[in-house]
Image (spheres, rainbow, N blue to C red):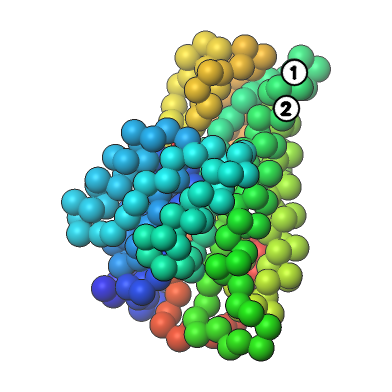
Amino acid sequence: MTGRIGRAIVSLADRVALVTGAGRGIGRAIALRLAGEGAAVVVNDIDREAAEETVERLRAAGGRGVAAEGNVADVAACEAAVAAAEAHFGGLDILVNNAGLTADGWLHKMSDQTWALTYEVMLKGTFQMCRAAAHLLRVAKGVVPTHHRKVVNIASINGIYGVAGNTNYSAAKAGVIGLTKALAREWAPQQINVNAVAPGFIEGTRLTAVRGEGEVLGNPGGDPGQDPSLDPHWSGWEAGGRGGGGRLPLLARLRLCHRPGDRGPWRKGVH
Ligand SMILES: NC(=O)c1ccc[n+]([C@@H]2O[C@H](COP(=O)([O-])OP(=O)(O)OC[C@H]3O[C@@H](n4cnc5c(N)ncnc54)[C@H](O)[C@@H]3O)[C@@H](O)[C@H]2O)c1
């Protein structure tokens, strides 16, 4: 299947993608878009029903996909998701590290648990997924790769500017940006294109929905340490002086697709 994104004609018909946290929100939109461009998609989410619903939707639209339930903070779950890509579709070309959550609170009241939660899922989870996928994304020494492979890490504008009441999330996302920059250099010789996307506020996802008291989004079980009265997304725009990122359809701008036979230039960085 071919499609047009910006000025580039893209074809992902023979590509395999894995999207974490793709049971809803941004991850689901990415999974559906990749499937719509022809890629086979492994849909990871900690929420099995949500992951299966995404797979149902992409199949209903004529796409190929399989659900891989699992917590990206868990090494075994990361390895299982990658194994699903190989078992069902024969490999992996595109990894999107999207799974994320907020657990907001003032730093002087923040529990160790609340601090660790965002780090475990977003920074450590991204590291673990990249490491688990390395043997499928990288080629053996001396082998000339036939096509680009892609890693896209979903960071946040919070990781660039910082947001009050959101130190744990902002630090984790800043870490994702640092990891991305270093891995882009490390894997460039392998023709693996590693980028981060740092969206502003995107309406309509669970993460940005109004929260219930004591609820930690994206993490069933919750953590009573957070302060649900905080809304760091909005305060962040004021503090950072930047506008929000917009609505889900703007995800079409994410650099997830590539031209057939495209060999460069190597774009590295945070978009
Ligand atoms: N919505 C925004 O305004 C915004 C802005 C900047 C960055 N982001 C980032 O975009 C990503 C997606 O956010 P969203 O707004 O779509 O949120 P969302 O809550 O709608 O979706 C997140 C998905 O990730 C899943 N998830 C949570 N923890 C997981 C784990 N440990 N393992 C596997 N799956 C897990 C959830 O079940 C959920 O389906 C996150 O990394 C978030 O930090 C969002």
Total numbered badges shown on the rendered structure: 2
Mark 2 secondary-structure assignment: helix
The part of the image, by quadrant, that contains residue 13 is bottom left
Amino acid type at circle 1 is: Ser
Q: Position of residue 234 (x, y in %)?
A: 56, 31
Asked if disc 2 is less than 8 Å from ligand 1, the answer is: no
Circle 1 sits on which residue? 111
Amino acid type at circle 2 is: Trp
Count residues near mark 2 (Cα–Cα under 10 Å), then give few for <14, some for 14-19, many for 20+. Answer: many
Q: Position of residue 32 (x, y in %)?
A: 33, 53
Q: 38 or 235, which lies in front?
A: 38
Numbered badge on residue 115: 2
Mark 1 secondary-structure assignment: loop
User: Disc 1 vs disc 2: Cβ atoms closer than 8 Å?
Assistant: yes
Count residues near mark 1 (Cα–Cα under 10 Å), then give few for <14, some for 14-19, many for 20+. Answer: some
Q: Is residue 154 visible?
A: no
User: Residue visible at 62% across and 64% down?
Assistant: 134
User: Residue visible at 42% across and 46% down?
Assistant: 68
